[in-house]
Image (spheres, helix red, strand yellow):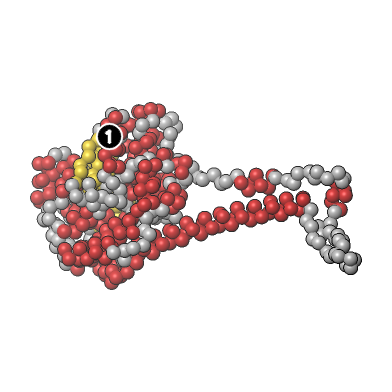
Amino acid sequence: MSLEHHPHTPSPQYDEEEKTSPSSSSSASSPAAEDARPFLRRSASAAGGGGRSRRRRTVSEPSLRSLSSHTSRGRSFGRDVGHAAAETFLLTRLAITLLRYLGFLLLFVMQLCLCQDFSKVRRSIIYGDRPRNRLDLYLPTKVDGLKPVVAFVTGGAWIIGYKAWGALLGRRLAERGIIVACIDYRNFPQGTISDMVEDASQGISFVCNNIGSYGGDPNRIYLIGQSAGAHIAACTILDQAIKECGERECTSWSVSQIKAYFGISGGYNMLELVDHFHSRGLYRSIFVSIMEGEQNLWRFSPEILVQDSSIKHAISLLPHVILFHGTSDQSIPSTASKKFVDTLHSVGAKVDIVLFEGKTHTDLFLQDPLRGGKDELLEHIAAVIYGGVAAAHAHISAAPLPRRLVPEFMLQLARKIIGEATSLVVGVARDLTYAFVSMLVGAALWLFAPP
């Protein structure tokens, strides 16, 4: 059973209402007489002794039932319009909140677009025919044989993900002799989760089948996902394994080509996380729409899917899974990774977890790299890719020690500004906006003073 698109089934209420017809009248009058009965009838009543008559308006029963049916349909339509408007309003508020705190960096963004050095970065390589089917390649400066490759799926709450968010990771790994492909994909509302999984799969397929043309080793490909990207990547690789176990399934890449999967600060059980996300500002109605309805939350929950005994063989095809998580992560609690690890262990998968004490949702991926110096996450990833700590240390020591990209007061200022936000989406917006503020500042400083 693969992860497929299951569109939400419209409510049958309209059909039921349209099929409802007025019941037969309890009156003894014939149908013809009933049809001839006027909508407004005139009746006379004695008022005192003056003999003056007054007109009284009455409505026939069939007309009342017809009017009630039309009113019911009108109210139902109104509720649907109101629900759609409410979701649009919430989504717009989320986007505005995220963008509001980025406004003061417009100058940096303009400089980023105008001044970036493209010498070792191949931008917007087309990997498919869908919107957003592009990827950026970060290439090592030394060309001395085939290089290991990382396919990276970025985060962004399934709404604002973009391939440029992987710029710091791409640069750091490229300095250590690793090619990085940052895969872009359709975001909500342009696409839903099945579209995101489809795009990620097609991007990985492009890497597997074409990376040799860019100096990459097709036999040493690794997959990394961060935050929402960790969820999308996990869904993608599990879906691919299930497809490979099915009959007559045509696939353009194989799970066996992926040597390991790294999940950074990800969530893997959507049924458990939907309420947490709502409390953090990613509203339930929006998140359920992203996941294609309440009934499909389990279908896009790798932690639940791997427990299905019917896909036991697919589990045996999965690569080594390594999860990273900060214990102070409030956007996605570290328990999300712990539970997924326990579940994978129980079904016989090869899995490990590394917890970083006191780290938040964005510390591992953005703040720590921006501060420069030793990068624990990077060292863990390099150790797996190069087959051991000693080999990884040789490549890491050969690269220049990462310098600080952002002064500490700017990081603290960004934390203070975002920490004072009071909107309804303060939870998710704070973490994501802080991450993007830090990343853009760091990227701009890197461009103006390259090493």
Q: Position of residue 144 (x, y in %)?
A: 16, 48
- Nearest the eye: 404 or 182: 404
Q: Residue furthest front?
A: 49
Q: Tell me where residue 341 appears, x and y as whole percent.
A: 27, 36
The amino acid beneath tag 1 is: Asp
Instruction: For residue 169, say whether it is visible.
Output: no
Which of 74 and 171 lies nearest the eye of the viewer? 74
For residue 312, which quarter of the picture? Answer: top left
Q: Residue at x 19, y 68 (%)?
A: 448
The quadrant in which residue 281 appears is bottom left
Quadrant in which residue 402 is drawn: bottom left
Q: Secondary structure at mark 1?
A: helix
User: Mark 1 packing: few (<14 Cα in 10 Å), some, or many (20+)?
Assistant: some
| Residue at image location 38% in from the left, 35% down from the top | 305
How far across and how far down the image is residue 154, in percent? 31, 52
Q: Is residue 276 above or below residue 249?
A: below
**Front-most of residues 241 and 275:** 275
| Foreground of the two, 422 or 80 | 422
Quarter of the image where the C terminus is located: bottom left
Residue 417 is situated, as x and y percent measured from the top left of the image, at 26, 65
Quarter containing the N terminus: top left
Residue found at x 16% / y 63%: 408
**In the rendered image, which residue does mark 1 sit on?**
342
What number of labels is visible? 1
Residue occupying the point 14% across, 61% down: 404
Residue 59 visible, this orientation? yes
